[in-house]
């Protein structure tokens, strides 16, 4: 039997209040910004999930940027409040995944059943575009993976699993699979 001893982890008192941060979105509505990553430079903490911006009970997919002391980075987002905005045509209520690209821009996606939304932002969280690449009802929570100047989208529909590879501008990378799309476990509606 091998025993492993771990060191006690202490909170950094310079972050938030005594090392803990209570994220309060504009309007102080409910939020679930619970998944974290670093931005492309490694200097901003990127938190994503869902929050309610203006209407209580109406969750929208959101990304927040925090600086090293835990405060919102007010240079980030279209409203310069540290949070992204999303157009009303989006049906996803939460961000399931973020793909960071080499130029610092990023895409988000979320589960939306009839949509497979790809929402694009620049490195400062300013909205660029949204597109729906669904080819039918979605049966799983989509995931993204940034690969420099391209990114992968993994999803499943009633036809099976599919992986798309897209360029930074969101267009299909036709050198991947069949016109930018690779299918797997076709004919299986329970791929997730």
Image (cartoon, grey):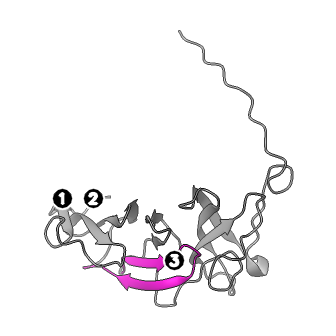
Which marked residue is nearer to the observer: mark 1 or mark 3? Answer: 3
Q: CA distance from mark 1 to mark 3?
A: 32 Å
Q: Position of residue 63 (x, y in %)?
A: 59, 71
User: Which residue was labeled with disc 3?
Assistant: 122
Indicate which disc, 3 or 2, sits on the residue closer to the N terminus.
3
Q: Disc 1 on helix, strand or loop?
A: strand
- Tally of numbered discs: 3
For disc 2, the marked residue is 191
Q: Going from the N terminus, do you reach mark 2 or mark 1 first?
A: 1
Looking at the image, residue 8 lies above or below residue 20: above
Q: Residue at x 64, y 70 (%)?
A: 64
Residue 130, located in which quarter of the rendered image? bottom left
Mark 1 or 3, nearer chain start? 3
Please state which of the two labelled residues, at mark 2 or mark 1, is closer to the viewer.
Answer: 1
Q: Which residues are magenta?
A: 115-135
Checking the image for residue 72, the label placed there is none
Q: Which residue is found at the position 72% from the left and 63% from the top? A: 67
Viewer-proximal residue, 79 or 97? 79
Categorize mark 1 by other alpha carbons within 10 Å: few (<14), some (14-19), many (20+): few
Front in this rendered view, residue 103 or 16: 103
Q: Secondary structure at mark 2?
A: loop
Q: Position of residue 137 (x, y in %)?
A: 30, 77
Residue 57 within the segment the image draws in magenta: no
Q: Secondary structure at mark 3?
A: loop
């Amino acid at each position: 039997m091998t025993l492993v001893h771990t060191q006690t982890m202490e909170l950094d008192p310079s972050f938030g209040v005594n090392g803990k941060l209570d994220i309060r979105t504009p309007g102080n509505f409910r939020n679930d910004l619970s998944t974290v990553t670093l931005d492309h430079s490694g200097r901003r903490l990127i938190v994503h999930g869902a929050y309610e911006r203006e209407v209580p009970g109406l969750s929208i997919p959101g990304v927040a940027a925090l600086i090293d002391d835990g405060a919102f980075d007010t240079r980030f987002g279209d409203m310069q409040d540290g949070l992204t905005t999303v157009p009303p045509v989006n049906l996803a209520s939460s961000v399931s995944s973020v793909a960071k690209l080499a130029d610092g821009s990023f895409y988000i996606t979320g589960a939306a059943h009839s949509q497979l939304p790809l929402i694009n932002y620049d490195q400062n969280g300013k909205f660029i575009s949204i597109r729906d690449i669904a080819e039918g009802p979605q049966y799983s929570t989509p995931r993204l993976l940034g690969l420099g100047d391209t990114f992968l989208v993994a999803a499943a529909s009633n036809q099976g699993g599919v992986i798309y590879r897209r360029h930074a501008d969101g267009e299909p990378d036709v050198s991947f699979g069949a016109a930018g799309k690779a299918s797997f476990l076709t004919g299986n509606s329970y791929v997730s």
